[in-house]
Image (cartoon, grey):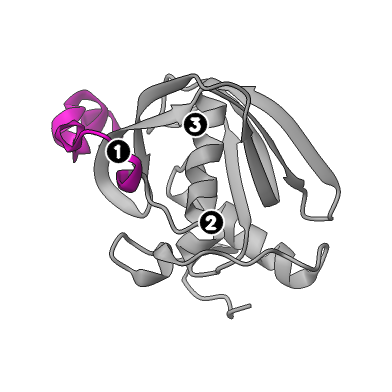
Amino acid sequence: MPTRRGRARGRALIRDILRMGDPRLLQPSARVEAFGTPALEALLEDLRDTMAARDGAGLAAPQIGVALQVVIFGGAPSARYPDAGEVPYTELVNPVLTPLSDEVEEGWEGCLSVPGFRGVVPRYLHLRYEGCDPRGQPLRREVSGFHARVVQHECDHLAGILYPMRMRDMARFGFTDILFPEAAAAED
């Protein structure tokens, strides 16, 4: 696992987030084989600190340059997604997603690796995700709505997929401050 790099803020280590165009974001991630290790805990700490500093709804290990199947997501609604509702904070390792119906919903998404943009992305409305927590304990949930959208978005990173690759209509892709000027004003 790479060494911890980034900008320190207080005791937190804020990692640089790879941006669209970096070839590392397109690579599939490896499964985690060892649980409860100091290296895995350091990775999770970096993910938590970086996601919090960027006001994200989720973050995947590949976004900070670590090609492992580790994602985190959730928490209280953020300024970026004020109407999303609360998603339980989750640390998920080696996830497997199973759609529970063919029902798909289109919705606006953004990404810390595609800063300043939003696009409309189709996602399964209902799904089950399975995997492990950082200690290797099984984790399984059936979810819908924004919760389902977030976990699909983050797990796509593990397969080297960025949300614009899933879009059906590029006319519904643009700069966040142009598409949502009221939200941009609230963030300033």
Residue 178 within the magenta-colored segment of the rendering: yes
Q: Residue furthest front?
A: 102
Residue 64: x %, y % from top left = 48, 65
Q: Amino acid at mark 2?
A: Leu
Which residue lies at the image location 36% right of the left edge and 55% below the top edge?
A: 113
**Image point (50%, 56%), residue name:** 159
Read off the magenta span.
Answer: 164-188
Q: What's the magenta bit mostly, secondary-structure-wise?
A: helix
Task: Residue under label 1, please give it.
Answer: 167
Question: Tag 3 or tag 1, which sits nearer the N-term?
Answer: 3
Disc 1 to disc 3, how far (Cα)?
14 Å
Where is 181 relative to 22, above or below? above
The residue beneath circle 3 is 149
**Residue 116 location, x and y as percent?**
24, 46
The foreground one among 9 and 135 is 135
Q: Identify which residue, 16 or 148, lies in the foreground.
A: 148
Q: Quadrant of residue 2?
A: bottom right
Query: Residue 72 location, x and y as percent?
Result: 60, 47
Above-or-below relation of 90 to 124: below
